[in-house]
Amino acid sequence: MTLPSLDFEILRRIRAEWFGNVRGDVLAGLVVALALIPEAIAFSIIAGVDPQVGLYASFSIAVLIAFTGGRPGMISAATAATAVLMVTLVRDHGLQYLLAATVLAGLIQIGAGVLKLGFVMRFVSRSVLTGFVNALAILIFLAQIPELINVTWVTYAMVAGGLAIIYGFPYLTKAIPSPLVCIVVLTGLAMWLGMDVRTVSDMGELPSTLPVFLIPDIPFNFETLMIILPYSLAVAMVGLLESLLTAQIVDDLTDTPSDRNRECIGQGIANTATGFIGGMAGCAMIGQSIINIKSGGRGRLSTLMAGLFLLFMILVLGEWVGLIPMPALVAIMIMVSIGTFSWRSVKNLRDHPKSSSFVMIATVVTVIFSHNLAIGVGVGVLLSGIFFAWRVSRNFAVSTLASEDGRERTYTVTGQLFFASSEDFMKAFDFKEVLDKVTIDLSAAHIWDLSSVAAIDMAVLKFRREGAEVELKGMNTASRTLVDRLGIHDKPGALERLMGH
């Protein structure tokens, strides 16, 4: 590609990511910003810090990730997933240690991106991803329950009205996002009729000044590092996991690709900078990202506008924003929950393999009971690996054929030889049979690991111990290389080593 064409390609990509959907991105960003305010306050309360910590973080992360992230149209801000990890640190050591841990978590994420660790998403199966999405949808819905307990009928009526607007308004026009119409209409009704409902201002006081640069006021020594490192590692891991899984979901919704390694670096830059302006760590938000997509947001401009609108509203329009009734935002989050849940996965429980359905359900149950997305996804990935290894090991076979005189025998190995199939491999041989020569044909097999090499060594040496000549034939290049490097059956003293065991 010549230099002028390269420049044109860069300009084309910038235009597509930033200015390909200006009207939709601006309106979607406004809806997201309105929904971010009560969530950021709630996440601050979870972490045990002042509301401005979560609000500053949401503004900072959203603005920075718009430029540095690898997934246009995805919303990142302060989240519950990272807030819950900081509770003990804040309680035992205070806000300044949280800020330092946020900076360190960001640096760890940058390192993950530089090392190109985004590839680990390849090991997350579709069943795990579906379980993650369903669990998050359930958690989003459960998070709205406190707003629906011990309230008057007015709250229920407003939530029902909000849902009617959200789902009904698009039949009139899609020019304006229905969640935005829901917020405007319900806020107007609440003010006009003087309805007694909870509002955003009841969640906590909104900040009135811009964030300022500050260095965390902590001792810079090894002891401090050991205090914050466990929290930073946990936040970095959970943040990247949720961000990459959310990116995959947005990829599927928009039929466009994302850059996972760039996303890792972008999340790291956003968190590092946020720690220096008094904000807590955050990551991608599946709920807000789906609100953005459903409201018409597609490009980086939507994420940038969400952050800028958030700052503008809390600093300039804070008094008006505080009047937004919580039922309007509850209705939006219920819409997100319904839209996020994969209803088809319930129907597919009967049709899909039982192992896939079990992995999906296990992921959902673990996330809901642990309230930790990383643990749930980890359980799902582990189970997926176990089931995969079991299925592959079942497709393994060893057939045998003796010569006419019965003095020679050929064993033909078919399938994948690895730790889960090495036991079946050994059981296929009759080491007590008196033979002059044994041929092990591996032309239809592949050797994967140290366990399989050790099994081959054991088989060869046991036959030699009984006086038979052994030939290995048909190994592909990769298998031959692994056996030559790790095998001991042709090394001096190998038989004595076996006899020693």
Image (cartoon, rainbow, N blue to C red):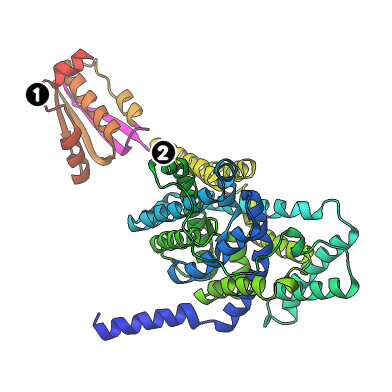
Alpha-carbon span between mark 2 and mark 1: 34 Å
Q: Which residue is label 1 attached to?
A: 492
Left or right of 198 in this view: 486: left
Q: Is residue 110 above or below residue 444?
A: below
Q: Is residue 425 above or below residue 313?
A: above
Residue 398 lies in the magenta stretch: yes
**Rendered residue at 36%/54% (across/down):** 111
Q: Are marks 2 and 1 in contact (CB under 8 Å)?
A: no
Name which residue type carries label 2: Ala
**Rendered residue at 17%/41% (across/down):** 481
Q: Is residue 455 above or below residue 299?
A: above
Left or right of 354 in this view: 491: left
SS class of the residue under badge 2? helix
**Rendered residue at 52%/55% (across/down):** 281
Does residue 412 appear in this view? yes
Residue sitting nearer the eye, 77 or 468: 77
Report crowding for label 1: few under 14, some 14 to 19, many 20 or more residues within 10 A (C-alpha): few
Left or right of 101 in this view: 348: right
- The quadrant of the rendering that contains the N terminus is bottom left
